[in-house]
Image: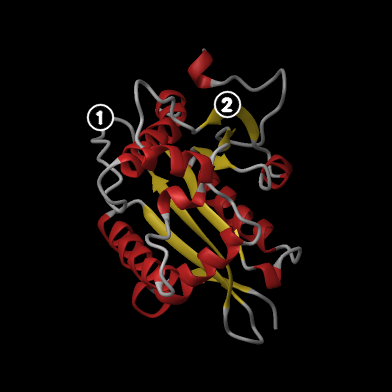
Amino acid sequence: MSFKLEEVDPVKDFTELIECEWISYENPNQTFFRLFCPIIGDGPNAREESLKESTARQLEWHQSDPTSYWQKIVDPKSKKIAAAALWKICPTNPFAHEEDHSEAYWFPEGGQRDFVTQALQRFDAPRARMGQRPQVYLNIIYTHPDFRRMGLGDMIMDWGINKAKDMGVEMWLDATVYGVPLYKKHGFVVVNENNLTPEATGEVSEEWKKIDKELSPMTMWQMWRPAGGPFQEGVTTKPWEA
């Protein structure tokens, strides 16, 4: 039997799905992940309670977003989730209407919430500027440490590329340093380097300083794959530069 790629069942899969997400981003530790999935508190149950909150919140986000498509790869032996991805399938321009950049409400009020809210605004800004067209956006991708170097990332990318090809649209993603080589192999090109760390103005709180020290530096690379095929240097025109 081989690995199987299938759509996530929100009722049956979400607890295991997000548990796998946390383990994957913690090994190795990728600090930007804590912008979205923080551990609140420092007691013995802090991680467990924060994981529960993250699971409920991400399920709510998924169910309220018609562009959201979660998929999983299941290990045929253990029947456990080995890898997963969240795609945003956007048949129209996702930035056609000005979005309400709400606060990072999953953080307590104060300096930490202010820091994360500004970091997430920086996270969204480059694609909002360059990606004003229908698209397939890879929002999240991860592989459990026990199943790496088995081609699971390639399976997920091939699915997304075929989906974009069928729709006739371009592709976008935000890459960490670990993901850039995989995405380049699949025809993506780096179009922007993005420092997510907000610039402090005026006097900042101890909470701001604490989370800044814990998470910084945070760098992401916006990557793009044109509609119709891989990027070709000197041949492909970038629409936002035309």
Question: Label 2's element?
Answer: strand
- 138 on left or right of 188: left
In which quadrant of the rendered image does the N terminus lie?
A: bottom right
- Residue 30 percent across, percent down from the top left: 59, 51
Farthest top residue?
A: 242
134 or 113: which is nearer to us? 113
Q: Going from the N terminus, do you reach mark 2 or mark 1 first?
A: 1
Instruction: Tell me what residue is drawn at x 64 percent, y 30 percent.
Output: 190
Query: Is residue 133 in view?
Result: no
- 32 on left or right of 184: left
- 179 on left or right of 94: right
- Residue 112 percent across, percent down from the top left: 36, 43
Instruction: Tell me what residue is drawn at x 44 percent, y 62 percent.
Output: 70
In this picture, is 114 found above or below 41?
above
Q: How many marks?
A: 2
Instruction: Tell me what residue is drawn at x 61 percent, y 43 percent.
Output: 176
Packing grade of label 2 (10 A; few <14, some 14-19, many >=20) is some
Packing grade of label 1 (10 A; few <14, some 14-19, many >=20) is few
- Residue 165 percent across, percent down from the top left: 55, 44
Instruction: Tell me what residue is drawn at x 69 percent, y 20 percent.
Output: 235
For residue 98, the mark is: 1
Question: Label 1's element?
Answer: loop
Q: Mark 2: which amino acid?
A: Asn
In this picture, is 242 found above or below 103?
above
Q: Which residue is mark 2?
A: 192
- Residue 36 percent across, percent down from the top left: 41, 51
